[in-house]
Image: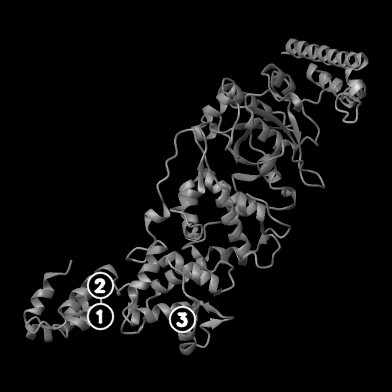
Amino acid sequence: KVNIMVSFLLSNTWLLDHSRVFFSVYCSSWLLYLCVSQCSAKNLKNISELFYYAQKAVLHPTGPLYCPEEKEMKPSCIKSLTRIFKVSDLDNDGILNDKELNFFQRTCFNMPLAPQALEDVKNVVRKNMTDGVEDNGLTLKGFLFLHTLFIQRGRHETTWTVLRRFGYDDDLELHQEYLFPLLKIPADCTTELNHNAYLFLQSVFDKHDKDRDCALSPEEVKDLFKVFPYMPWGPDVNNTVCTNDQGWITYQGYLSQWTLTTYLDVQRCLEYLGYLGYSIICEQESQAAAITVTRNKRIDLQKKQTQRSVFRCNILGARGEWQDQLPAGLSGSQPKQRKIREDHKSFYSINTTYVYGQEKYLLLHEVMPDFDFLSEEDLACDVVCLVYDVNNPRSFEYCAKVYKQYFMDSKTPCMMIASKSDLHEARQHYSLTPLDFCRKNKLHPPQPWTCNTVDAPNKDLYTKLTTMAMYPHAKLRCMCTCNRCTFCICQNILRSQLLTNIKAKFYSVVLNRHMAQADLKSSTFWLRASVGATVFAVLGFAMYRAILKQR
C-alpha cells in the first residue's frame, strides 16, 4: 500500500521540488526517491515507474540491505549472507564451486545456471575483484560483491529471494516459523532423530573435521557453530559424551549429544537444525522432517516390543562419589584421573550400547537425592538405577526406602548397583542385606561396579540396563551368577558337554546333505530321530517344571 503522501506530492510540483529531504526519510527505497523526484502527474511522466518502485520498496525494501551514503551493504545483511554462504559451502573449503553454485541457484530460484552463465558471473567478479574467484570457485568476498552489485543495479529482489529462502524476515532475523516448525508430540511419547537426520549430521561433522581424526577440536567446534547466533554447547558437553584423550568430542560423542538434545528438548533441536540449514540442504519442508515421534509407551508394554532407540535411566542414591563415576563410566572416561569444575559438571551422560546386535542409546540422568520429594520427571524413565556404596554402612537404607515408596508398585524395572565393589563391603544398617532385599522384592541381585581399574570401566552393566529398559516385561534372570538357583542350574545343563554332543549328533543326522536316500527311509534313522526328539522333550519339560517351581 502506497501512502497518500505520494499522490499529494505528485499533484504539487513545487512541493515535490522542496520535499526531497522529507521524502528520502519517508521512503524506504532510494530508487523510489529518485523516480519520484523526476515524475509529473500533469505530464504523466514516470507514473508507471513510480508505482513499480513503490511496490518494490514495500515487497523488497532496500533500507535493511544497503546504505546509499556509504555505498555498501549493512552489517546485518553481510552477517546474514555470510551464514548463507557457509551453509551452501558443502565441503567447507571457503569456495563455492560449480556444483555448490548450481545447488544454491536451484534452491533459491528453482533452476540451475547454464555453464556459460556461470562463467559470465565469475568473469564479472574477476574484473572487479582480485580475490573474488579462487580455484575457479566463488569466495565469500565475491559472493558478497555480487549481491552488492545486484542492489546497486536495482535488482535487490534477487537478494531478498535468497534471504527469504533461507528463512529471514524483513528485519533480517530468522522467522520463528522457520526455526520452530509445528510438531505434535502426544503424551507418553518421545522424540528421536531419524536416519536422514543422522546422515545430515554426519555430513556436517565430516565437513568441519578438517584433520580427519574423527574428533572436533575446540577450533573446529567454533567453526561449526559460526552459523549460530550464539554458542549452543557449553563446557558440560565434554563431560556428557565420549571424548578422546585430548578431551575433544569424538564422532560418536557428537551424534550422542544431538540425540540427547532431541530427547530432552526437541524444540531446541529444531532450532539448531534450522541454523544449520537442514530443510534447505536436505530439501525438506521443515526441520520437523528430521524428527521421529515414538509410539506410546503403553502400547510398547502391551505388545511387549519397542522400536525406540533411546532409553532413559534415572540414577538415585545417597550422595557420594558414585555421582561422578557411574555416568562418566558410560562415556568411557576415567573420573579418578581428572577434576571437574562445578560449572563444567553435567547431570546427564549418553552413549551407545548394543543389545542383541542392535545399537541403542542409553541416557543416564543423575537425580539429586531428595527422599521427601521426587517429581514426575524424576520418576519418568525406562529403568531405575539404585546405587549404594558398599563401603558406607548407611547408603543402602536410602535406596531401600526410595524403592518401597516410589517403585515397588511401579512397572518401571529397577536395578540395585553396589558401587565401589573393589573396597571392603561394610555391613549395612538395614534390617535386610542388599541381597536378601532384592530376593524379597524379586529384583536382580546387586550388580557390582567400580571404576578403580587400570582399564576403562566394564560396559556390561550399561548393556544390562538397556536390556531391562527395552524388555521391562521380561524377567532377565540371566544377570544372576550365583550358580545355585534353578535358572543357573538349567543354564549349566544346557551348556554341558553331554547335551552339546547329543545336539551335535542329532543335527548331523538330520541336516546331513549327503545322506543317502535309502538311509532316510531306513528304520534305523527314524529310531535315532525319535530317541533324540524324546530326549529333548524330556529335558525341556523338566526345565519348565523346575523354573515354574522356582517362581
Q: Using the image, tell me which numbered label, if any, was put on residue 57.
A: 2
Sequence-first disc among 1 and 3: 1
Where disc 1 sits, the SS reads: helix
Q: Is residue 501 above or below residue 360?
A: above
Q: How is the image coloured?
A: one colour
Q: Is residue 531 above or below residue 96?
A: above
Q: Quadrant of the N terminus?
A: bottom left
Q: Are marks 2 and 1 in contact (CB under 8 Å)?
A: yes
Write down the residue under mark 3: 121
- 310 or 161: which is nearer to us? 161
In the rendered image, residue 176, in percent from the top left (x then y), is placed at: 37, 55
Q: Using the image, tell me which numbered label, if any, was put on residue 31.
A: 1
Q: Is residue 348 above or below residue 45?
A: above
- At x 25%, y 72%, the residue is 57
Badge 2, how many Cα within 10 Å: few under 14, some, many 20+?
many
Where disc 3 sits, the SS reads: helix
Separation of marks 2 and 3 at Cα, in angstroms: 26 Å
